[in-house]
Amino acid sequence: MIVVDYSLVAFRLTSLSAGTCAHCVARLQSRLRGVVGVMNVDVTPDSGQVHVLVDALHVAESVADELWEAGWEREPECAGSPSMMA
């Protein structure tokens, strides 16, 4: 059985407005669609909202990889505080 878990993430951008040109909207959509795990992007300038449909598994893996590469341990020493690798 194959299970795919998707999540819809919404952002409100103060710099996105009804006056935002179509070229800038398309450029934003293209950039977001290039992110690993992003399945679909809906940009609505009138409301300043961006909705991103993501494959939760890929995004979680990407975040974990970024944290690891930035020097954070995968399992913190203390549950209340993440620790940096020496």
Image (tube, grey):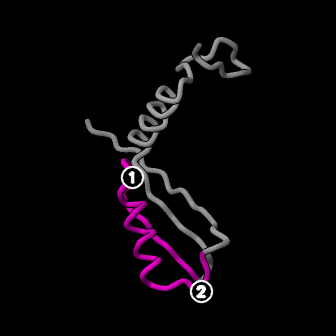
The local secondary structure at tag 2 comes to loop
Q: Residue at 45% across / 69% down in the picture?
A: 28
Name which residue lies at 48% across and 37% down: 63
Residue type for callout 1: Val
- Give coordinates of residue 62: x percent, y percent: 43, 38
User: According to the image, label 1 marks what residue?
Assistant: 35
Along the viewing direction, whichever of 67 and 5 lies nearer the viewer: 67
Judged from this view, the residue extending furthest toward the right is: 80
Q: Residue at x 66, y 22 (%)?
A: 82
- Looking at the figure, which quarter contains the N terminus? top left
Where, by quadrant of the figure, is residue 32 drawn?
Answer: bottom left
Q: Looking at the picture, which amino acid does disc 2 mark? A: Ala
Give the CA separation, mark 1 to mark 2.
Answer: 25 Å
Q: Which image quadrant is residue 78 in?
A: top right
Which quadrant of the figure contains the C terminus?
A: top right
Expressed as whole percent of the image width and height from the top left, the position of residue 68 reads 48, 26
Q: Residues within 10 Å of mark 2 (few under 14, many from 20)?
A: few
**Residue annotated with mark 2:** 18
Q: Is residue 2 above or below residue 29?
A: above
Q: Which residues are magenta?
A: 16-45
